[in-house]
Structures are given as C-alpha cells and as structure tokens.
Image (cartoon, rainbow, N blue to C red):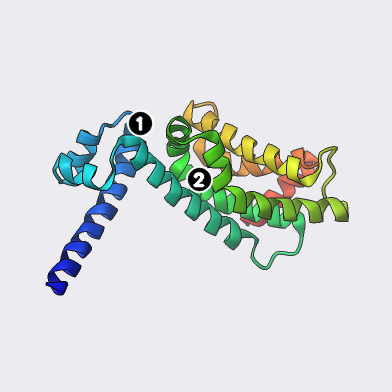
Amino acid sequence: MAAMTMGNASRADVNRHRILDVALAELLRDPDASMDQIARAAGVVRRTVYGHFPNREALIGTLFEGAAQAVEAAHAAGREGIEDPAESLVRSTLAVWAIADRYRLLVALAQRSVTVQGIRERLTPVREACVEVLQRGLDQGVFESPLPAPALAYVHEQMLFALMEAVNDGLLAAEEAGRSAVVTMLTAAGVPASRATELVAKTND
C-alpha cells in the first residue's frame, strides 16, 4: 500500500510539473489561454489540472512563484564574488534579465492575478540585496543620487517592470533590452551614460 501511495504521489508530482511547464509555454504563446487549452496541451483531462490548481489565478500565482525563485537565484549568482558596486549591478541585472525575459509576459499576467503588494513582498530578498549594492556604491561615490538606497532600489525595480512591458508592447527589441536596462539603471544611479555603456560592453566581452 505504501509503495502504491508513493507511486501515486510520484505520478501526481510528474503531472504537476508537466502542467506547469506546458502552462508557461501556452501562456507565453497566448496570454488568454484557458485551463481547458492548457489541459489539452499537457495531454491530461481538465479535472487533473483543477486537481492541482483550483483556478487560473492559482496556476499563474504558482508560475510567478517559480519565476521569483529563478530571479532570486540569478541575482545572487550574478553578484557573487563581485566587490565593485557598479560591476555587481551590471552582472546581477544582466543575470536577472536573462531569466526575466523568459517570464516577462508572465509578469504582466501576474500583475492581473497576484496583488501588487504580493509581488513586492515576494521580491523582497532581491530588493534587499539591491539596496546593499546601491548603498555601497553611494558610500564609495560610485553612484550618486538624491534618493536613499532603499528608494533607489524601488525605482530600479519599477524600471525593470516598465522595460519588460516596453518589450511586450513592441517598443523595445528583446535582444537589446537587457543591455539597455542595465545602462538605464546605471544612469539612474548617477553613472554617466558613456561610463555605463562602457561597463556593460566590458561585462559582455
């Protein structure tokens, strides 16, 4: 009986992961994809999808949670071992954008299904790390801003969301967006545009 229960649990986990993978692909292809469409694409019956996720909002919320975890890990990896605040900002932002670009349509969907406060709270660890980098930069004179580091971190966060929307709306080429985002964030932190462009080019070499 225990082996059967474990087998059933394993199949349920496999189904759940498959539904999430397919749902992400379907929603990126069609932001209005229904639960029925996702079930068909995943090769399961509608009841199976609803067994894991009671509604579309819960499914999108779970996908957003996975995206937030990926962003947090990418941000940490990007700044690991980097002492210079400007380089840390460049590398961590480029690392985040590489992840976020995959999820940028999902972020727009999450803003409909997950409260703005909920999104802010889930991104708190990344924001706190940004505050630390920005504060070091301000203390060292690498960055210059009339805003304190916590407020500047909020500005950077909202700029990233806005740039994702710009890509979604066809106002910014996806292949250029990551580099453009970093230059924009550096200039917002008081780094001259020429120096910001140089730093990003150096990091990409």
- Going 31% across and 36% down the picture, which residue do you hit? 56
From the top left corner, tell me how far across and down residue 188 is, in percent: 75, 38
- The local crowd at label 1, few if under 14, some if 14 to 19, many if 20 or more residues have their Cα within 10 Å, is some
Which label was assigned to residue 100? 2
Pick the front one: 63 or 103? 63
Q: Quadrant of the N terminus?
A: bottom left
In the figure, 147 relative to 73: above or below? above
User: Badge 1 is on which residue?
Assistant: 31
Pick the front one: 151 or 33? 151
Pick the front one: 93 or 111? 111
Q: Is residue 201 visible?
A: no
Check disc 2 and report its element: helix, strand or loop. helix
Check disc 1 and report its element: helix, strand or loop. loop
From the top left corner, tell me how far across and down residue 7 is, in percent: 16, 67
Quarter assignment of residue 91: bottom right
- Going 87% across and 56% down the picture, which residue do you hit? 140
Mark 2 → mark 1, Cα distance in angstroms? 16 Å
Q: Amino acid at mark 1?
A: Pro
